[in-house]
Image (spheres, rainbow, N blue to C red):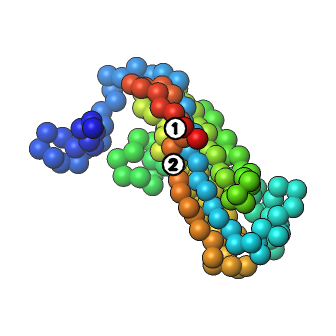
Amino acid sequence: MNELSHLDEQGRVKMVNVAAKEATLRTARARSIVVLPQEMMRHLEHGDIRSKKGSVFQAAVIGGIMAAKRTGELIPLCHPLGMDSCDIEIHVNDRQEVVIDCTASITAKTGIEMEAMVGATMAALTIYDMCKAMSHDIVIKETRLIEKTGGKRDFRREE
């Protein structure tokens, strides 16, 4: 396992210095999975859930993108980045789970994984918020990095 990048030689917290790194194209895709109770899944039509607040999945896309743009303000020591793109896709899989994929990209000296993770997570939380009036039996099952490119090494999780 590599050394923790946010600690100095004395074990004190530090922000990673990226000054000497080369700016390269970096992409990341993260996924969150939300499990909704069956009674809520009955409200699914045309790939979305309508609530009194409006389109649940469209609100989740907006919430996820807004949060991804603010990742540097939310996570301590995370570099603030101006993303080149952020895309969130939401669908229901064959196990009746809501799958949220957030893909972010940037040409920069540091990676964009945290922005993708924050985007997917906030989209999941937005779904919870918009649906909690119908049920509190909503589970945000997981959030994980699916793939990243650029930087020292690429990564791809077997799906």
- If you read the primary sequence from the N terminus, does the residue marked by circle 2 or circle 1 appear first? 2
Q: Position of residue 85 (x, y in %)?
A: 63, 35
Q: Position of residue 149 (x, y in %)?
A: 51, 28
At mark 1, the secondary structure is: loop
State the residue position of label 2. Answer: 144
Residue sitting at x 65%, y 64%: 35
Q: Does residue 61 lie above or below 106 as drawn? A: below
Residue 69 visible in the shown view: no
Compute the Cα span from label 2 to label 1.
Answer: 9 Å
Residue 9 visible in the shown view: yes
Graded by Cα atoms within 10 Å as few (under 14), some (14 to 19) or many (20 or more), the crowding at tag 2 reads: some
Q: Are marks 2 and 1 in contact (CB under 8 Å)?
A: yes
Identity of the amino acid at label 2? Arg
Q: Is residue 136 left or right of residue 16?
A: right
Q: Does residue 39 lie above or below 92 as drawn? A: below
Identity of the amino acid at label 1? Arg
Q: Is residue 99 left or right of residue 146?
A: right
Graded by Cα atoms within 10 Å as few (under 14), some (14 to 19) or many (20 or more), the crowding at tag 1 reads: few
Q: Does residue 65 lie above or below 141 as drawn? A: above
> Looking at the rendering, which quadrant does residue 92 occupy?
bottom right
Residue positioned most to the right: 46
Q: Position of residue 152 (x, y in %)?
A: 39, 25
State the residue position of label 1. Answer: 157
